[in-house]
Image (cartoon, grey):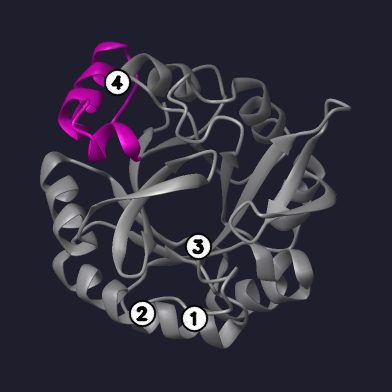
Amino acid sequence: MLTRRLIVCLDVKGGRVVKGVNFVGLRDVGDPVALATRYEAEGADEITFLDISASAEDRATLLEVARRTAEQLFIPLTIGGGVRTADDVGRALRAGADKVSLNSAMVADPTVLTACAERFGAQCVVASIDAKLDDGGTWRVWTHGGRTPTNLDAVAWAEECVERGAGEVLLTSIDRDGARTGYDLPLMRAVSTRVTAPVIASGGAGNASHVIDVLADGHADAALVAGILHDNVTTVGALKDAMRASGLVVR
């Protein structure tokens, strides 16, 4: 059986970790370096570090904060936010990232994703997709931190991203983000059954049952959590214990 991963996300703005609901109402929850090292000690499999305002504000990723975080970690680190070119990916990898996520830039120019995969390898490239259900029942891709709608069908876009070389898909439900009502299982299932790359589920974790549900029956290969850890609702250790007890294979 495949090992299921628990990934902790640190959304960063202005050098601080923040958390909101549906991508808005952001509040400060702490220092990224301190939180990353804490979650690693608790048993997190990976850390994902996203500068959530970089694309919207036309700023580069906060590489210095990422570098300080990477220096303290022994688990894989993904960096994203404001990554526009293959050269940006190279800078993030040199700053200590194991993987780099692309979102707005690859929507604007899909050849960027192809170029990054060819230059650094699929294992370094994560296609980050923010999806929201429209009135017609289709999940649409939004960019720039969930601020800008597109006409892209999220499922078809995920397929194209993998075809272009993405090694993983980080799939976030904007509708569920921060709501703690559970992951969008139909969305996760729709994408995971159409792509060959691993799918990381994001948006909606409220308890261990939600994590177990999204990792069971092929919905996703990994679960990304944030707010319930930042607010001390639960711990990485408690979540992983529950995953093991449910029969999931974990590290």
Instruction: Give me the residue at 51% from left, 36% from top.
Output: 177
Mark 3 to mark 4 CA distance (whole Å): 25 Å
Marks 4 and 1 in Cβ contact (< 8 Å): no
The magenta span reads 226-250
Say which label, 3 or 4, has the lower sequence index.
3
Q: Name the one closer to the observer, 122 or 240.
A: 240
Say which label, 3 or 2, has the lower sequence index.
2
**Amino acid type, mark 1:** Ala
Instruction: Give me the residue at 66% from left, 54% from top.
Output: 147
Say which label, 4 or 2, has the lower sequence index.
2
Mark 3 to mark 1 CA distance (whole Å): 22 Å
Could you tell me which secondary element the residue under label 1 belongs to? Answer: loop
Which residue is denoted by mark 2 in the rendering?
63
Q: Is residue 99 above or below residue 169?
A: below
Which residue is denoted by mark 3 in the rendering?
123
Which residue is denoted by mark 1 in the rendering?
60
Which residue is denoted by mark 4 in the rendering?
243
Marks 4 and 2 in Cβ contact (< 8 Å): no
**Amino acid type, mark 3:** Gln
Q: In which quarter of the image is the N terminus?
A: top left
Dot 3 crowding, Cα within 10 Å, few <14, some 14–19, many 20+: some
Could you tell me which secondary element the residue under label 3 belongs to? Answer: helix
Marks 2 and 1 in Cβ contact (< 8 Å): yes
Q: Whole-percent x and y of residue 205?
A: 41, 27
Mark 3 to mark 2 CA distance (whole Å): 20 Å
Mark 4 to mark 1 CA distance (whole Å): 37 Å
Q: Whole-percent x and y of residue 65?
A: 28, 74
